């Protein structure tokens, strides 16, 4: 007897579910991995004072991390979540780089002003020495004994 696909309905349904669940599980794992990387990048940017030097970029990265989290929780958004997380990671990395650049520029400016101050200090002539104290004329000094007094033992 020849078997038809109708007889394999239970097995066929299980196989179909396994094949459809595999891409969804892979998409969810990818979303979680990208989301974790994006959150770490946002933390690195925050540690580099991106809130001060690149507030618009760090806020955009935080918003995209939140959006990626929301997308990862929905079935229809699981494929988009890794892409949004990668965008958040790129924004956070750019915010960190701009923050580090601004911090280095501030340090450079501070060092340059210190160099300028020291160069000015070296360029000015030193203050004039104090005039020497005049010694009294030699004839007013007491005469020193020419012989030593005898000592008794």
Image (cartoon, grey):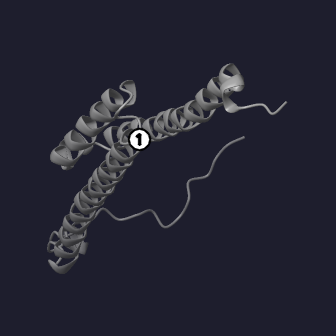
Q: Position of residue 47 (x, y in %)?
A: 36, 38
Q: Position of residue 120 (x, y in %)?
A: 16, 74
Q: Nearer the viewer, residue 138 or 1?
A: 1
Name, please, the residue furthest toward the top. Answer: 10
Q: Position of residue 114 (x, y in %)?
A: 23, 64
Q: Position of residue 134 (x, y in %)?
A: 17, 70
Q: Nearer the viewer, residue 138 or 98?
A: 98
Position above or below: 125 against 4? below
Crowd class of label 1 (few under 14; some 14 to 19; many from 20; radius 10 Å): some
Residue at 56% x, 37% y is 26
Name the residue tied to disc 1.
79
Name, please, the residue furthest toward the front. Answer: 1
Query: For residue 122, what is the image quadrant?
Result: bottom left
Query: For residue 109, what is the image quadrant?
Result: bottom left
Task: Tell me the element at label 1.
Answer: loop
Q: How many marks?
A: 1
Residue at 49% x, 33% y is 28
Residue at 35% x, 65% y is 143
- The N terminus lies in which quarter of the figure? top right
Q: Nearer the viewer, residue 49 or 153?
A: 49
- The C terminus lies in which quarter of the figure? top right
Q: Nearer the viewer, residue 124 or 53?
A: 53
Query: For residue 19, what is the image quadrant?
Result: top right
Position above or below: 94 against 70? below
Q: Is residue 14 left or right of residue 75?
A: right
Residue at 21% x, 43% y is 60
């Amino acid at each position: 007897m020849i078997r038809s696909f109708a007889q394999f309905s239970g097995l066929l349904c299980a196989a179909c579910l396994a094949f459809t669940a595999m891409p969804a599980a892979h998409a969810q794992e990818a979303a979680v991995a990208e989301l974790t990387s994006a959150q770490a990048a946002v933390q690195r940017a925050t540690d580099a004072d991106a809130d001060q030097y690149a507030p618009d970029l760090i806020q955009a990265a935080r918003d995209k991390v939140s959006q990626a989290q929301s997308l990862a929780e929905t079935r229809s958004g699981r494929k988009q979540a890794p892409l949004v997380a990668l965008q958040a990671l790129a924004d956070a990395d750019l915010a960190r780089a701009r923050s580090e650049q601004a911090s280095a520029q501030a340090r450079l400016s501070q060092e340059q002003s210190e160099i300028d101050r020291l160069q000015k200090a070296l360029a000015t002539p030193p203050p004039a020495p104090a005039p020497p104290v005049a010694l009294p004329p030699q004839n007013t000094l007491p005469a020193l004994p020419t012989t030593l007094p005898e000592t008794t033992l």
